[in-house]
Image (cartoon, rainbow, N blue to C red):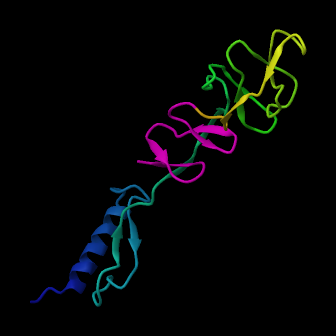
Amino acid sequence: MTITRKTICRIAGAAVTALLLAGCLPPGAITINPGPGIGGGGGGGGGIAPPAPTVVEATFTRSASCKGRRGRNGGRGVGSLDGSCYSCPSGYRRTIFPAKSRNACEKGGPPPFGTWVRAEKLGRPGCRAGEFQVGDGCYTCPSGTSRRGSRQCVRR
C-alpha cells in the first residue's frame, strides 16, 4: 500500500478535529488555512496556521506635558497655546505675552525697569520612558504585550 500526501493530510485533519472535539485543545488554538495544499495537489499554502494574535487597546496614562524639560538657556519647560513647549532663561519668568514674542520672558519688572527676552522653543510636549505618544496623549501597553499600530498592543 502506498501512502500519499493526500492520505496524510486527511489523517492529520481527522486527528486535529478529534482533539478539538475531545476538548484537548482550547477553541481557537488552531485555525485551518484552506489553501491549495489541503487535499493533496499543488504546492504549499494550506495547512494548520498559528493562532491569530490577541489585540488589546493601549492604556491612556496622561496628557503629554512640558514638565521636566529644560532648555539650553537653563530654564524649565512651560506650555503654550500653540501646543509647543518653551523655556525662559534661568532667572526670568514667563509673561502673559505670546511665547514667540520678544517680551515673552521678563526679569526685574516691566520696561523700562526690567529686561525682556524671547522664550526658547523646545518642541512638542513629550511622554516618559516606557510610554508612547499618540496625538497629545501618552499611552502604555499592558504587561505581556507589545505595541502594534497607533493605540493597539498585541500579546507576545
Horizontal and vertical percent position of residue 11? 24, 76
Query: Hey, which quadrant is residue 9 in on the image?
Result: bottom left
Q: Is residue 8 shown left or right of residue 105?
A: left
**Quarter of the rendering occupied by the N terminus:** bottom left
Residue appearing at x 88%, y 10% in the figure: 113
Where 135 sits versus 94, above or below? Answer: below
Horizontal and vertical percent position of residue 91? 71, 12
For the residue pair 40 and 2, the one nearer the viewer reads as 40
Please, which residue is most extreme toward the left here? 1
Horizontal and vertical percent position of residue 65? 68, 30
The question of residue 34 being in magenta is answered with no
Query: Hey, which quadrant is residue 47 in on the image?
Result: bottom left
Q: Is residue 140 shown left or right of residue 53?
A: right
Q: Is residue 93 shown left or right of residue 29?
A: right
Q: Which residues are magenta?
A: 128-156
Query: Hey, which quadrant is residue 99 in on the image?
Result: top right
Q: How many numbered tags mark residues here?
A: 0
For the residue pair 22 and 90, the one nearer the viewer reads as 90
Q: Is residue 24 shown left or right of residue 90?
A: left
Residue appearing at x 79%, y 39% in the figure: 82
For the residue pair 66 and 22, the one nearer the viewer reads as 66
For the residue pair 73 and 149, the one nearer the viewer reads as 73
The question of residue 146 being in magenta is answered with yes
Horizontal and vertical percent position of residue 130? 50, 34
Residue appearing at x 40%, y 79% in the figure: 34
Please, which residue is most extreme toward the front here? 112
Residue appearing at x 62%, y 37% in the figure: 138
